[in-house]
Structure formats: C-alpha cells, structure tokens
Image: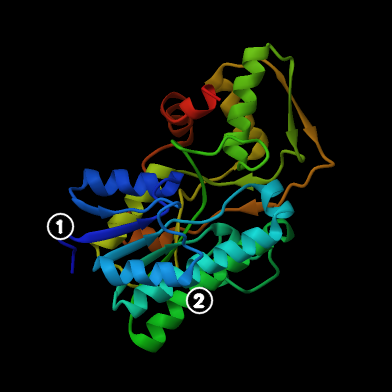
Amino acid sequence: MTLEKTARIFVAGHNGMVGAALCRRLADKGYVNLVTRSRADLDLTDQSAVRRFFDEQELDYVFIAAAKVGGIHANNVYRAEFLHQNLMIAANLIDAAHVAGLDRLMFLGSSCIYPRDCPQPIREEYLLTGPLESTNEPYALAKIAGVKLCEAYNAQYGRRYVSVMPTNLYGPGDNYDLQTSHVLPALLRKAVEAKAAGAAELNLWGTGTPRREFLFVDDLADACVHLMERDYAGGLINVGTGEDVTIRELAELIMDVVGVDASLTFDASRPDGTPRKLLDVSQLAAQGWTAKTDLRTGIEQALAGGFSQFRSA
C-alpha cells in the first residue's frame, strides 16, 4: 500500500549526498513529515541511542543512506573504520526498526559488494559468488552484512525490508576532497584546478582502462521513492543506468565540460580497482523505472549547481 503523504519517513544520513537527494525528492513528491537527525543529535553507532530514537518517533518508513564512504584511497587506508562504523550503522538501524515494530525500510548499499571479477553486466544473484575487490573489501563486507540483515529479518519476522544497490554516484553535495573522494568528483576537481592554473597536463591514477557506470544522485533518489511508492518488497535490486565508460573517456568528457585544454597522463603505479563494474538493471526496469539524466548533463549540473562547496574552499 502506498504511503500517505503525511507518513513519518526517517532519512538516515540526510546531510550526505544521497540522503539530501532523497529529502529533495520526497519533498517534491509532497511528503510533509520527513524526520532527520544530524550526527551531533544522534550517533548511529550507539545502539541504545538509536533504539530510544525509534521508540520515540513512531515512524512509517526508513531510508538508510547513512554510511562512512570514500574512494579507493580512503577505503584502502581506513579499513578498520570503514568496516566497524558501517557495520554498526546497518546493524543498529535495521534492528531498532524491527524492535520498534516497523515493517518497511530501505537499505542503500553499493555495487562494490559484488565480486571483483563478476560476469558483466552484474546481476543481483552474483552476490557472494567470488572474492571481493581487496581495496574496498571492508566497506563491501559491511554493506553485505546490511543486505543479509534485511533478508534475515524478512525471513524470521516477516518484515519487508528492501536492499537497493546503486552504481557509482555523483551530483550535488558530492565530496571533492582528493584524499577521500570517488573518481568522478576527483576528476572534476582536478579538471577545474587544471583550468584555473593553465596546466598543460592532467595526471590520473591508474591506467584509465577500467570501465565504470555513473548515476546522477537525484536519479537514485527518484528510483528509491518510486520503489517505495510501488510498495516494492522483493529482494536485492540494482539501480544504475545500464551503460558504462572507461576512466579515460570519463576524464575526456569532464575536461570537455569544464573547458580545460590539457593532455591526459596516467600513473600506472596507482591501483585501478575492479576492471569493470556495470549493473544489470532489468529488475528495476521491470518495476517501471529507468535513469533520466545522461552523463554529460549530470556532470554539467554537478559543476553548475553542486560545486559551490569546493569553489569556496
């Protein structure tokens, strides 16, 4: 049954890129009782605090968009933090929702949960069929635990908790810190700085050959709300565009959008990560949803509307 517009919907992680996009989309659709808490107000790694919060709120639906996130460098260096914090967030929120009697919840994972050398495109049933990419294994393990928690609560208690697996995301509110960001915002920042400096060269990590799929974050939010409104209660479901590009092609597109005239060079001593990561989105298409924002348009919007925090830094 579709939720009433007055339903109390908790968006965990509302200050992050994904959570903010979810709040925008829910507000646009007329949901008037969005519940949010900042990290200072609610520590999601504190089980007792999370349980008290759920006991008090009488929620109807929860989106779990809260997570400790980062690119290859951050995942590989801060391995303990990525594993511990993301495990705690998933376990505390999913269990607290159950204890409070909440039947509906959406857990947002990541396509990095799939094996490193998956057949392409990646179908949902490929989960746990092979080794993970070593550079982001801690984060992936925590997200897999969240998926399995949802499945377990559904099987044991009849809950209707859904796990959504988005591909690589970008857009307004992204992280442009070169030490912790993902590949697209990192390339966007490098291109802007190269243009400002009049640089003749733009150097990138890796070989430029890995292929990646990119989804505009507002499209992800639209897909999530679409599934909520359809009362989707199936298993793990991928969210993506169904199209990918090489890192070199991405860099060339970003340079064209930014208007930077420089040559591309690659540092092959740096890790490439997974060779290819393209999601099979046929299950989502069967639910009546496809991505709307092409890559060039999304990059233009990220540059024009979501880049102010970097420009002012």
Q: Is the residue 111 above or below the residue 203 in the image?
A: below
Query: Judging from the image, what secondary structure is the residue with disc 1 in?
Result: loop
Work out which quarter of the rendered image holds the C terminus and state it.
top right
Direction from residue 216 to residue 271 in the image, left or right: right
Q: Which mark is residue 148?
A: 2
Q: Amino acid at mark 2?
A: Lys
Q: Is residue 200 left or right of residue 253?
A: right
| Residue 85: image location, x then y, percent | 58, 62
In the image, farthest residue toward the top:
198
- The residue positioned 56% from the left and 61% from the top of the image is 122
Q: Compute the Cα span from label 1 to label 2.
A: 30 Å
Q: Which mark is residue 234?
A: none
What residue is disc 1 on?
A: 6
The residue that appears at 29% across and 78% down in the rendered structure is 101
- Residue 150 vs 42, above or below: the answer is below
For label 2, the SS is helix
Displayed quadrant of residue 56: bottom left
Disc 2 residue crowd, few under 14, some 14–19, many 20+, Cα 10 Å: some
Q: Is residue 5 above or below residue 150?
A: above
Q: Residue furthest bottom?
A: 156
Sequence-earlier tag: 1 or 2: 1
Instruction: Tell me residue 244's x, y (percent).
Output: 56, 45
Kind of residue indicated by mark 1 = Thr
Residue 308, how many percent across, how many down? 47, 25
Q: How crowded is the residue under tag 1: few (<14 C-alpha within 10 Å), some, or many (20+)?
A: few
Whether residue 117 can be seen here: no
Identify the image quadrant of the N terminus. Answer: bottom left
Residue 195 image offset from top left, x and y in percent: 63, 15
Q: Is residue 301 left or right of residue 144?
A: left
